[in-house]
Image (spheres, rainbow, N blue to C red):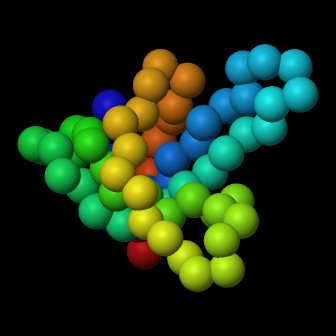
């Protein structure tokens, strides 16, 4: 898995009743675009945005930011 800042990380719901989670990658700490990533979750219930260090599992996909 490779990503860059601005890409979207998508965790697919893999059980009944589990919703998809999405996050924006705000920092890449691994070599050559690899994990771990610092992400900002879109569904974070906190009023104050928080970033989290995240190691994606096999249920995660990266959606690359469109180049302009």
Q: How many marks?
A: 0
In the image, residue 15 sits, relative to residue 29, either above or below, namely: above
Picture quarter with the C terminus: bottom left
Tell me which residue sits at (44%, 25%) in the image: 57
> Would you say 65 lies left or right of 26 here?
right
Picture quarter with the N terminus: top left
Tell me which residue sits at (27%, 43%) in the image: 36
> Would you say 38 lies left or right of 17 here?
left
Q: Residue lying at the far left in this picture: please name it.
A: 31
Tell me the quarter of the picture where residue 49 sits: bottom right
Tell me the quarter of the picture where residue 39 sits: bottom left
Q: Position of residue 7 (x, y in %)?
A: 44, 57
In the image, residue 49 sits, relative to residue 11, either above or below, namely: below
Q: Position of residue 12 (x, y in %)?
A: 67, 31
Q: Position of residue 53 (x, y in %)?
A: 35, 51
Tell me the quarter of the picture where residue 6 sits: bottom left
In the image, residue 46 sits, relative to residue 9, either above or below, namely: below
Q: Position of residue 19 (x, y in %)?
A: 80, 38
Task: Examine the rendering and report whether any part of residue 66 can be seen.
Answer: no
Task: Examine the rendering and report whether any part of residue 52 can be seen.
Answer: yes
Q: Residue lying at the far bottom in this picture: please name it.
A: 48
Tell me which residue sits at (67%, 45%) in the image: 21
> Would you say 47 lies left or right of 9 here?
right
Tell me which residue sits at (72%, 20%) in the image: 14
In the image, residue 52 sits, relative to residue 3, either above or below, namely: below
**Which residue is more in the foreground, 48 or 37?**
48
């Amino acid at each position: 898995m490779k990503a860059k800042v601005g890409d979207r990380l998508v965790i697919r719901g893999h059980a009944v009743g589990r919703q998809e989670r999405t996050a924006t990658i705000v920092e890449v700490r691994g070599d050559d675009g690899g994990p771990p990533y610092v992400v900002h979750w879109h569904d974070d219930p906190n009023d104050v945005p928080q970033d989290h260090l995240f190691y994606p599992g096999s249920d995660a996909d990266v959606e690359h930011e469109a180049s302009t």
